[in-house]
Image (cartoon, grey):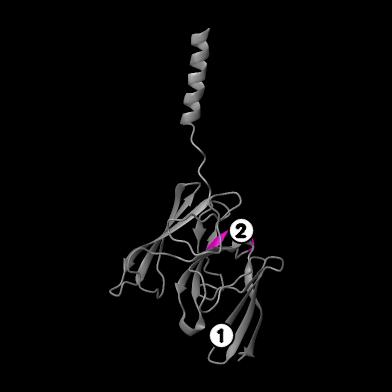
Amino acid sequence: MKTTLLSIILTSIFFINCSKPSPEKGHGSGNPTTEKKEVKTSKNENFDFKVSVAAKDDENRPVQLKINIFKNNKGFQEIMYTPGTWPAVEDSLSLNRINYFLSGEKIKEGIENYHDFIIADFNFDQLEDFAILYDSGGNGGPVYSYYFQDKNDGTFKMNKEFPLNEGAFPKIIDSNNKTLTTIAPLGCCKINTTIFQLKENKWNILSSKEQDMKR
């Protein structure tokens, strides 16, 4: 009887010592992150985007990037991306990221303060999409390339019909009215505000106006 009781106690101790704690899961945020940190982008799926430099020019500027997409910690998709003009990269690539899809934060992209990799729903299908910096844009502000999640297979693809391709990031994403509003400088002294609306799977310009830049 003593031997049996001792065996039970030792067995219990063995299982307690061998059990591993569950790893902590990260959450997307508006803070800049490096490539080693996880970006979670879906309420139903766990996507992790990792971007690396595939090729540089003679001045160490990236001319081709590789976007590796992991779904539930497994390799899911690889995208080879050719940007416009990026700053030089000396060592490892570090991107400023933000996840508007989950955070619900007010959009705060600007001419000087902006993110390189942005997750949001651009076509109002309740699936996360992403924008990646195409060019820093100089005085006109940054411009982006946009990738959309396919509702059938979950892969991310460009849409040639999207009006903001290699264009500004929207200041307002209105899911109720299915509109995207861009506000961008025009020349030296004016601001252009354009509202695009998605209706019956087609993008149309709802309105566009120019105003004098406030001084």
- Residue that badge 2 annotates: 102
User: Is 54 included in the stretch rendered in magenta?
Assistant: no
Which amino acid type is marked by label 2?
A: Leu
Q: Is residue 166 visible to the viewer in this orientation of the structure?
A: no
Magenta residues, start to end: 124-130
Which residue extends farthest front?
A: 2
Q: Report crowding for label 2: few under 14, some 14 to 19, many 20 or more residues within 10 A (C-alpha).
A: some
- Residue that badge 1 annotates: 185
Find residue 80 and report its image quarter: bottom left
Can you give x and y, in whole percent of width and height, for residue 112 in the image?
50, 78
Residue found 61% across the figure and 74% down from its top = 171
Of 79 and 35, the residue lying toward us: 35
Secondary structure of residue under mark 1:
strand
Can you give x and y, in whole percent of width and height, for residue 86 in the image?
40, 73
Can you give x and y, in whole percent of width and height, for residue 210 in the image?
63, 88
Of 198 and 140, the residue lying toward us: 140
What mark, if any, has residue 43 been given in the picture?
A: none
Secondary structure of residue under mark 2:
helix
Which of the two discs, 2 and 1, sits closer to the camera? 2
- Residue 10, relative to residue 131: is it above or below? above
User: Is 128 included in the stretch rendered in magenta?
Assistant: yes
Image quadrant holding the C terminus, namely: bottom right
- Residue 9, relative to residue 182: is it above or below? above
Q: Is residue 113 visible to the viewer in this orientation of the structure?
A: yes
Q: Does the magenta stretch mainly form a helix, a strand or a loop?
A: loop
Tag count in the figure?
Answer: 2
Which amino acid type is marked by label 1?
A: Pro
Q: Report crowding for label 1: few under 14, some 14 to 19, many 20 or more residues within 10 A (C-alpha).
A: some
- Residue 166, relative to residue 35: is it above or below? below
